Amino acid sequence: MSQLEIEKIAMVVNSGEYDRVNYALSIAKIALALGMEVHAIFTYGGLARLIKGRTDDLGDIPDALVRQQVELNLAKGRMGKISDDLKEAKKLGLNVYACVHAMGVLNVSRAELVDEVDQVMGLASFLDIARGAQTYYI
């Protein structure tokens, strides 16, 4: 394997902003289609996206122009819903984890999370899984 070949990607999805979560899932789907192994842990704002009924909420997008573009692109079908992207990524093999610490801070139970979550885990377990991976913080 050359130094440029990446076989595994680990993502820490900390932001819950719609465009960032959408982009994280786009990276995951492309990497999976290229045959890479992808693991994503959702924490804090990102974790809030995994709560049933909140996955596709636009939420607070601080940049008005970005919010306008997200709304426009969703309406025109140029940007997918996060829930659809998550389902597609899972079909391709995405491993989805919820951060147990963030769940405690946000008072979220496992029962409140979408079915696409594979496991609830702490950072130590995630870092063990992520060992040797190209890591992204989103």
Image (spheres, rainbow, N blue to C red):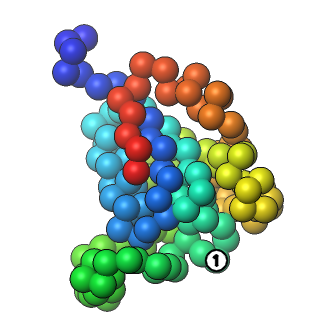
Name the image quarter holding residue 136.
top left
- Label tally: 1
Q: List x then y, in percent, for residue 51.
A: 66, 67
What residue lies at 47% left-to-right and 59% top-to-bottom? 15
Q: List x then y, in percent, for residue 79.
A: 30, 73
Q: Which residue lies furthest to the top in this view?
A: 1
Which quadrant, please, contains the N terminus? top left
User: Under tag 1, what secondary structure?
Assistant: loop
User: In the visual, does 61 lie left or right of 14?
Assistant: left
Residue type at mark 1: give it. Answer: Gly
Q: Nearer the viewer, residue 19 or 8?
A: 19
What residue lies at 50% left-to-right and 27% top-to-bottom? 130
Residue occupied by mark 1: 53
Q: Nearer the viewer, residue 42 or 64?
A: 64
User: In the visual, does 32 lie left or right of 117?
Assistant: left
Q: List x then y, in percent, for residue 30.
A: 29, 47
Residue 107 seen anywhere in this rendered image of the structure = yes
Q: Within 10 angstroms of label 1, few (less than 14), some, or many (20 or more) residues?
A: few
Examine the rendered structure and indicate whether residue 99 appears above or below residue 46: above
User: In the visual, does 133 lie left or right of 16?
Assistant: left
Q: List x then y, in percent, for residue 110.
A: 78, 56
Examine the rendered structure and indicate whether residue 36 appears above or below residue 40: above
What residue lies at 40% left-to-right and 25% top-to-bottom? 133
What residue lies at 41% left-to-right and 44% top-to-bottom? 137
Residue 77 seen anywhere in this rendered image of the structure = no
